[in-house]
Structures are given as C-alpha cells and as structure tokens.
Image (cartoon, grey):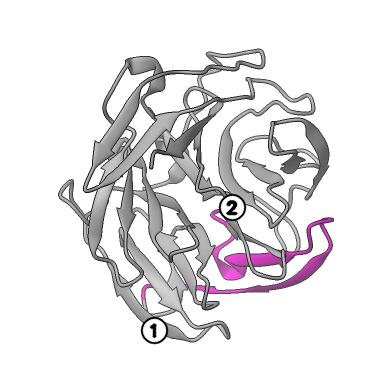
Amino acid sequence: MKKSNFLISLGIISAVIIVVSSFTFSAFGLQFAHKTMWGGNGVANGQFKQANGIAIDSKDNVYVGDFAAYTTRMIQKFTPNGTFISGFGSYGNGPDLFTNPSGMTSDNKDNIFIDDYGNPNFAVKEFTTNGTFIRSFGTLGIGPGQFINPGGVGTGPQGNIYVTDFGENNNVQKFDPNGNFLESFGTYGSGNGQFINPIDLGIDKSNKLYIADNSNHRVQVLDSNGNYITQFGNTGPIAEQILDPAGVAINSHGDVYVTDGKQAVVHVYSPIQ
C-alpha cells in the first residue's frame, strides 16, 4: 500500500489554532490530557501541506516533517510553544534529500534521524539540529534490517534504534546503536500490540514506545520489547481525537506530541500524575 493512499491532507484548517481542553484519558495507570495544538494548511513558515514526522531535541525544540511540501524546507524547526525557527531539507532522490520525510527522532547527541518513505534505499537519514547531513542507511527488501515502507524511527535511552515498517510488514524493527538488527515485533490487526500501518514512533525517558497506529486511529504505548501497555487518541470529544496519526514525539516533561495529517494540526497530550 502506498502511503499517499491514506495520508492525505484535506486542508480543513488554514490558520494557527490553539486549543486547551479538560478532556482526559486514563488506562493502565497512565493518564493524558489534551493540552494544545498549532499549525494550519499552507506553505508559509509554520504551516503544513501534510504534517507528518515529528521530533524533539534536548532543548525541547520541535521538528516537523512535511510529507507533501516539495520545497527547500521539508523539515521545519519550532520552539516548544510552536514559534517557527528555521527549515531545511530539499526535495529530491538522494542520501541527503527527501521525497517523503516520514518518522523523525533525536538521539542523546541531538542529531536528528529522519525516515524517507519514498526513498527506501536511503531509508534512514541523520542530520545535525542545524540541518547538516551526516549519513544515511537502510535498503529496500523484506529481510531483517530492510524496509518496504519505512515510516518512523526512534532512539531509546540505551541508544537502540527502532524503525516502523508499514503496509506489507506492519511491524517495528529494533537495531543496536551501530545499526545491527536485533529483533522485530507486531503483526497486522486491530488488537493490542497489533498494527494497521504503524507510521511513526516516539520513545520516552523510561524507554516506552509510542506507536502512531495510523489506520487504527490511535497511539499505542509498548515497552521496549514490544509488550502492550495502553493506547489513546481514539476516544473522547471528536475535536480531540486523532483522525490521522502520522508523527509522535515526547518531550522532557513527558508531553506527547502527535501530528494529525488529515486535520493539519499538532495534538499535545500531557501525562497526569
């Protein structure tokens, strides 16, 4: 399945929107409240044609990939409150270019890892926070360490790298810090720990994985070995539900940022102690 078949921006929202809500979600001892969102449909700084991958660095700056911008700033950098800082990344087919930037994450050195869905022979790309290219890795295939539809990438506290592969495989692959394959988990379905198009993932300080389970319209939370913990985003007031979860990231305070491609916004969920 091609990603463009189900990740389509409808241009519903055309201005920056801030929403603060009292709605909360609770399961398995974890609680989240919808905090705010920003963005809007367009090509100006701070707007998106199709907001997709998202990452947060150690200073809580937010990086958002635009799946359909086709510009010279396919990656945008924001302050934690959503103020535009800069952009980088040109459209094209090469190790340092993007066709469809998908999942994103930052490591403990604040380097940014970005999956390029439309470029599986250069599946994972690494950049500095200023947009300087470092390296790329990954090839097309169905074997361990290969990808059909690389969607999301995350790095855990121990430096392990996790990559989602959606469509045909519907799983998550786990690598060591040197890129050596360790294991994979997840199967096709709507049950706990199953996926239908796992587009992206984020990892918190306690090594929990937050998977953007796109066609199930939810975010699933798993431990580092793939065991199910909880899920959210598919309940509550319709305005606060995630219709098209495309990117997910967690800041140093435990806030969970989720991009919604269909609504062209960023949802923010806060943990409740």
- Placement of 33 over or under 215, stated as above or below: above
Q: Nearer the viewer, residue 173 or 121?
A: 173
Asked if residue 74 lies left or right of residue 152, the reply is right
Q: Amino acid at mark 1?
A: Leu
Res 236 seen here: yes
Characterize the local packing of mark 1: few (<14), some (14-19) or many (20 or more) Cα atoms within 10 angstroms.
Answer: some
Query: Quadrant location of residue 229?
Result: bottom left
Q: Which residues are magenta?
A: 116-142
Q: Position of residue 243 (x, y in %)?
A: 37, 27
Q: Nearer the viewer, residue 98 or 51?
A: 51
Quarter of the image where the C terminus is located: top left
Q: Which residue is mark 1?
A: 182
Res 238 label: none
Res 168 seen here: no
Characterize the local packing of mark 2: few (<14), some (14-19) or many (20 or more) Cα atoms within 10 angstroms.
Answer: few
Q: Which residue is mark 2?
A: 252
